[in-house]
Image (cartoon, rainbow, N blue to C red):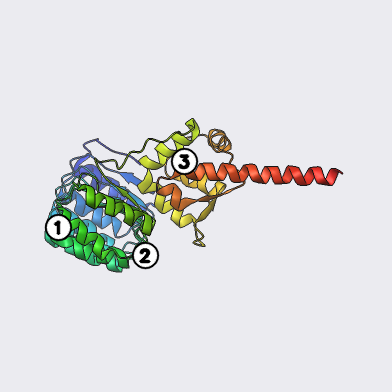
Amino acid sequence: LSLEDNKIGLRGVATLCDVLSEHSYVKHLNLAGNGLNDPTAGVLGQMLKVNYTLTCLNVRQNQFSCLGAKAIAEALLSNDSLNELDISWNKIRSRGSEAIGKMVATNTGLISLNVSFNGLDALGAAAFTKAIKTNSQLVNLDLINTRIPGSECKELGKALALNTTLKIVKLGNNPFKEPDIELLFHGLTTTSLYIIGLEDIPLSKGLYERLQEFEKEQKVVIHYGRSGGNQRSRPMTSSALRLDEFITTNLSKLAPLVLAKDKDKTGQLTVSEFKECLQEAGLRLRQNELNRLVDKLNLREDQVPHKEILMGKIPSVLERMRNSAKQKRVKVNTEENEDSF
């Protein structure tokens, strides 16, 4: 249900929450850009305490301050059914972000959390660092432009090294200096992360080269440069390009779905499972169109290595998978020819 940019107001949200408190059929709720204030967040919080069907809540670009953040955080202390929360671009400062961080430490439902373009400051940053050490559910965490102080980098790196479930962390556009980044990666002695975002953080050539070595050693992708990550020029077919663009744009939604689908932790999905994830993440194609897209890539009989896909290595993955498919077809044809003699 999307009510984005509708100026719905407190009365509208109250009426909506009354319905959602009694009826459990809405799974996705988008209230972004409505100018909602703290009393409205309180109403949403009360609804979240009794609604266990809603899995995705988007309240970005509203007017929530610390009180509103505390109301949402308090509700999620007892709600483990909400998987995705976007509370970015509000007016949340240290006390409010501290409340969200403390909630994350014990919450067992959230898979994706976006608090970007708020103000964690030292208090909130410390709370999130502690939460990262103990949380075992979160896959995607967006902390872009949240005023994390450089003094928190060393402990943040240690926390990220301890966490085994987080796959994407975005730290771009924070006031980090080069020594802070050094301390961050000094603490990050090992990692389960797929992607680390450092967009809009100035790096010297020497540090950039050391981080490239870190990428190779830890098999992780670091996004540098301007927001949006390190854009690479890669020759791709139109089908691969379309897939690559969708995954890049919808990574925060796709990653949790893919990891949840890989229940046996094999690092592989069947093509059928991968297509289901693409559709759930919002790839708006009819089934026959999606089949044609995948068919053009000759992936029908292969397993999809999702880590490399999520890390933005689509060209090499697709090339390898196409070669594998060709080899299988050649082998089958050879065996059939041998049987005919």
Instruction: Give the camera-side residue of 214 and 194.
Output: 214
- Is disc 1 in contact with disc 2, using a CB cutoff of under 8 Å? no
Q: Earlier in the sequence, mark 1 or mark 2?
A: 1
In 3D space, how far apart are the residues under numbered discs 2 and 3 (Cα atoms)? Answer: 27 Å
Secondary structure under the numbered disc 3 in the rendered image: helix
Tell me the kind of residue under disc 1.
Gly
Q: Which mark is residue 139?
A: none
The residue that label 2 is drawn on is: 164
Dot label at residue 315? 3
Quadrant in the picture for the N terminus: top left
The residue positioned 14% from the left and 48% from the top of the image is 91
Secondary structure found at label 2: loop
Neighbour tally class for label 3: few under 14, some 14-19, many 20 plus, Cα within 10 Å: some
Q: CA distance from mark 1 to mark 2?
A: 23 Å
Quarter occupied by residue 134 = bottom left
Mark 1 nearby-residue class (10 Å; few <14, some 14–19, many ≥20): some
How far across and down, in percent of the image, does residue 5 sit?
A: 24, 35
The answer for how far apart the CA atoms under marks 3 and 1 are is: 36 Å
- Mark 2: which amino acid? Thr
Residue shown at 83%/46% (left/top)?
339
N-terminal of the two: label 3 or label 1? 1
The residue indicated by pointer 1 is 150
Tell whether label 3 touches label 2 (CB within 8 Å).
no
Disc 2 crowd, CA 10 A, few/some/many (<14, 14-19, 20+): some
Q: Which of pointers 3 and 1 indicates the residue nearer the eye?
A: 3
